[in-house]
Image (tube, rainbow, N blue to C red):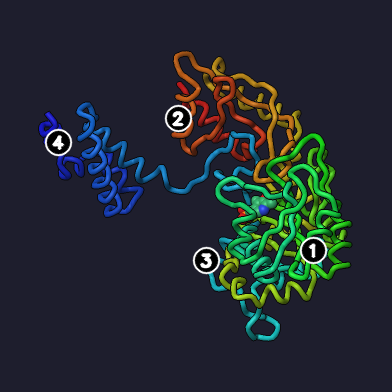
Amino acid sequence: MKENQLRKLPSMETILSNPVVMELYKQYPRNLVKEAINDALEKIRLESKNNPEQDISIQNIMNEVRQILSKRKIRKVLNGTGVLLHTNLGRSPLPMISCIKVLEVMSSYSNLEYNLFSGERGSRLENIEYLITKLTGGESAFVVNNNAGAVLLVLSTFCRDKEVIVSRGELVEIGGSFRVPDIMLQSGAKLVEVGTTNITRISDYAKAINENTSSLLKVHPSNFSIKGYTQQVDLKELVSLGRDKNLITIEDLGSGLLKNYPIEFLKPEPTVEDSIKAGVDLVLFSGDKLLGGPQCGIIIGKNHLIKIIKQHPLSRALRIDKMTVAALEAVLEIYFDENRLFSESPLFRMLLMDVSELRKRARYILRKVINKEYFKIIEGVSTTGGGSLPDCAIPTLLITVKKEGKTAEELSIYFRNTNPPLIGTINNDTFTIDLRTILEIQDEELITSLNKVL
Ligand SMILES: *Cc1c(COP(=O)(O)O)cnc(C)c1O
C-alpha cells in the first residue's frame, strides 16, 4: 500500500510542465522554484509514510510549493488587529517621506560618514544627535540597533562587575525573550532588586547602596500594570538620591513618547522630555514604538556619559545602518512641526482618528462591499501594544464578518490568504477587523479583500 502511494507521486518532469509552474516562473527565479518543488515533494513523501491517506495530487504539491515560496516572504499586510504597535506585524509603519528618503539614500552613495563642510571623515549620527537634543532638551544622544541593545550597551559601559539597583515591581518581561535581568546578566552587571512587586520606596533604594553600587535603574513597566495598592518611587527623588550618592540614574522608558500631546489616552504615558527635565542621566527607548520610527534604540543623556558610551567596543557592534539613519532623520524632522506630525505620521494619524472619522470610513466600505449581509459595524476598543500604555483602551469601530457555514477560524484563514493578507482577531466566535489600524490609504485594499468572501 505504502509503496504504491510513493510510486504515485508525480515525477519532476510532470510537475515542471504544470501550468502553475509557468506562472511561478514569472514571479520567482526558476532555480528557486525547483528548490521549492523538491522540498514540497520531500515533505509530502515523508508525510505519506505516516499517513496512507496523504493527498499526493499535483494540486496539493503545487499548494505546498506556493506556500514555501510566498507565505514566508516578507510583504505588506492589512493590520485589522486593533493593536497599533504589533511586534509581529512590524510595530510602527513609517511616514512616506521617511520611506522615500531611505530609497534615495540606499540606491546611491551618500555622505553617511563624510563631512561635506571639511571634506573629511564625518560621523553617521551627527545630525540625528542634533535633532534629538533639540527635540528633547537632552545634552547628547546616541542610537543603536534597538532598545535591548541600548540597555546592554549602557549597563556594559557603566555597571560591569558592579551593582545596579532596580525595583522588583519593574522587572519586566516583554513579549518574545527580552527580560531585563537577562540583559543585565549579559552586561556583567549585578542586579540588586529592592522593594516588593507592588511597593518600592526611596528608602529601599537608599538602604541597598554600598561601595560597589554603580547606578539606579528605573524601568518603565510598559506592557503590564500592577493595580491596587502600589507605590513606585518618584523620578525626582531617585535622581536626587543618585546625585547625593554619586550614582548614575538610568531610565529604560521602553515606548518613548517624546512629549505630551493633546491626546487623552496618551496622558498616563511618561515622556522622554519629562525624564530629561527630571534630571535622569541616561534615558533609553525604542525607535519603533510610540516614536513611530524605524527599529532602533535611542539613548539620551549627559555629555560626559554619552562620550564614554560611544567609546565602548559594543557601540560599534550595535551601530545602526544607513537605512535607519535615513528613516530616523526624516521622522525626527517631522517632530519639529506638530501639524506635520499629526498628518504625516501614520502612527499619530491612527492615534488621533476619532470614531466619527472611523464611522465615515466604515460606511464607505460597507457601501462598496458586495455581500453586505456578511458584515456589521460595531463599537470596540483598540490598544497601543508594543509595550506601551497597558491599560489604554481607545474607542474604535470594528467590522465583523459572519458567513453561514463558515467558522471564524475558517474566515481568518481565508483572509490571511488574500492579497495583501488581512490579519484580524476572533472575538466571541466572530472574525473581527478593527478599522483604526487599517491605514486610510488601504481602505480600497480592504474592500477588495472583503469582497473575496463569496
Ligand atoms: C520594548 C521594550 C524594550 C525592548 O526594546 P526593543 O527596541 O524591542 O529592543 C526594553 N525595555 C522596555 C521597557 C520596553 O518596553
- The residue indicated by pointer 1 is 209
The amino acid marked with disc number 1 is Ile
- Is tag 4's residue or tag 2's residue first in the polypeptide sequence? 4
| Residue depicted at 64% across the width and 75% down the height | 312
Which label lies toward us, 4 or 2? 4
- Is tag 1's residue or tag 2's residue first in the polypeptide sequence? 1
Which label lies toward us, 1 or 2? 1
The amino acid marked with disc number 3 is Ser
User: 343 left or right of 110?
Assistant: right
The amino acid marked with disc number 4 is Leu
Quarter residue 128 falls in? bottom right
Quadrant that contains the C terminus? top left
Quadrant that contains the N terminus? top left
- The residue indicated by pointer 4 is 6
Q: Is residue 405 visible?
A: yes
- Is tag 1's residue or tag 3's residue first in the polypeptide sequence? 3
Q: Distance between the residues labelled 2 and 3?
A: 37 Å
The amino acid marked with disc number 2 is Ile
- Please state the horizontal and vertical placement of residue 80, each as a whole percent of the image: 59, 34
- The residue indicated by pointer 2 is 413
| Residue depicted at 79% across the width and 74% down the height | 303
In this view of the protein, which residue sits in the foreground, 57 or 107?
A: 57
User: 172 left or right of 321?
Assistant: right
Mark 3 residue element: loop
- Please state the horizontal and vertical placement of residue 181, each as a whole percent of the image: 63, 55
- The residue indicated by pointer 3 is 107
